[in-house]
Image (cartoon, helix red, strand yellow):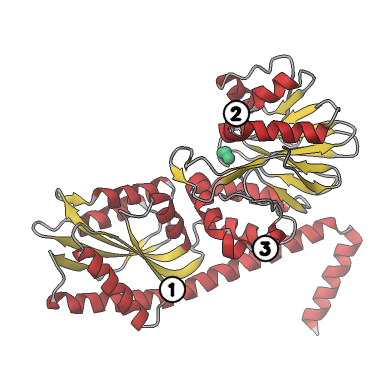
Amino acid sequence: MHCVRKVTDDLYWVGANDYRTELFENIHPIPEGVSYNSYVLLDEKTVLFDCVDWSVCRTFLENLAHVLKDRPLDYLVINHLEPDHAASIAEVLLRHPETTVISNEKGFMFMRQFGFDVDGRMDTVKEGDTRCFGKHTVTFLFAQMVHWPEAMVTFDTTNGVLFSADAFGSFGNLGGKLFDDEVNFDRDWIDNARRYFTNIVGKYGPFVQQLLAKAKTAPIKMFCPLHGPVWRTNLGYYIDKHDKWSRYIPEENGVMIVYASMYGNTESAAQALASRLCDRGITNVKVYDVSKTHVSYLVSEAFKYSHIILASVTYNLNIYPVMEDFLHHLKVLNLSKRVFGIIENGSWAIKSGTLMEQYIDENLKDCRIINSRVTINSSGNRSNEDEMDELADAIVKSVAEEEKVLEAGEKAVAEAAAQAEQKAALKKMSAKERMALRLAKRRAEQS
Ligand code: FEO
């Protein structure tokens, strides 16, 4: 049975939701599922934009057949070759021998690597090339390393739709809805979106920034990503989130406490710190057991909060392995610009605090460690009370300082955006209009 949605007058969503896969990329839990989005344009020519994962191929093929009816499929545009989208290319091409595949050179290289036979039906595009399908003309913008080397996005210059590949995507199933204005994104989706971005694309922040800069030059009215809702109303909200995540700027000035505890003593210390912070008015605090929380959730929260407090027992004269794994993920995903605090524990040869500090210093860029470490010998006792108070006070102070840093950062970004807008407006003006503006400015300054 088909399951499609109309996106615009002549564009249809023919993707599918996947509730069955437990682990995305066989690593990240997706308890709320994921959607694989694919879109068909019915112009003078018919065009399919990307395919879906093998797990939902049957639904996808039914959807495609339903929308095409008896029409041939003239073109298949492949923006991204990762198999969660590309796995069903072969099935589409088997059913549609008439189809020409449009992709870039690296895209076709990956198609061959994955075993798709596209010889004799390739149309290779370069950055900025255009293709006209009748009423609609599209242009191709390369989105290298967002998050594979071949990734590109396709912009429909006729209606302002950006087929954005993995960019602006999210974990989570659509459940019949499609558009951002059909869901309460900030309440129901943002955690899935952040976890998707930070774990899948997080490492490639500078490349995301390049794509955002390119996106600014196009009059985009709609994002059609390969996962999650289609954005047609509140695009600025989602661009802002991606801008922060890709610059490694915390979304919130708050405190994430992550503890690694074997018998509950380090956990007690983490809870004691959390209550002290709340007592001091810092209530934006989240506490996580590193052994009980999948690391993809911890990574996502680390991107969200400004302060990360690590509380770890010493294990085999090292950092507790699960905590070390969390730190390794932060390193690999390039997390930076955070303030850290340290609580260490051990029954003999307490090493975890020094080792965690060393790990942060050596591997995480632009991070600061609060100079008030709490050292617990097996279990917290009265002698730890002062240390804990000191750490809590130092975090409160740092949160207040960070508020100013974040405000200044936001101001600088807003000013840079306004300047860029002014520059773009000036570019559009004629020489005469520019001269008139300069004269008016000079007069205003002189008066
Ligand atoms: Fe959704 Fe990079 O694949």
Q: As drawn, is 423 to the left or to the right of 282? A: right
Q: Three-letter amino acid code at disc 1? A: Asn
Q: Is mark 2 within 8 Å of ligand 1?
A: no
Label 1 sits on residue: 284
Q: Position of residue 244 (x, y in %)?
A: 55, 59
- Of helix, strand and loop, which one carries label 3? helix
Q: Position of residue 433 (x, y in %)?
A: 89, 64
Dot 3 crowding, Cα within 10 Å, few <14, some 14–19, many 20+:
few
Residue in view at x 60 percent, y 49 percent: 173
Q: Nearer the viewer, residue 109 or 286?
A: 286
Q: Nearer the viewer, residue 299 or 430?
A: 299
Structural distance between the alpha carbons of marks 1 and 3: 29 Å
- Quarter of the displayed picture in which ligand 1 can be seen: top right
Q: Is residue 212 above or below residue 75?
A: below
Residue in view at x 74 percent, y 43 percent: 4
Q: Is residue 377 above or below residue 232?
A: below
Mark 1 or mark 2: whose residue is earlier in sequence: 2
Mark 3 or mark 2: whose residue is earlier in sequence: 2
Q: Where is residue 71, by image quadrant?
A: top right
- Of helix, strand and loop, which one carries label 1? loop
Residue in view at x 82 percent, y 69 percent: 438
Name, please, the residue furthest toward the bottom: 447
Q: Three-letter amino acid code at disc 2? A: Ala
Label 3 sits on residue: 417
Mark 1 or mark 3: whose residue is earlier in sequence: 1
Q: Is residue 345 above or below residue 132?
A: below
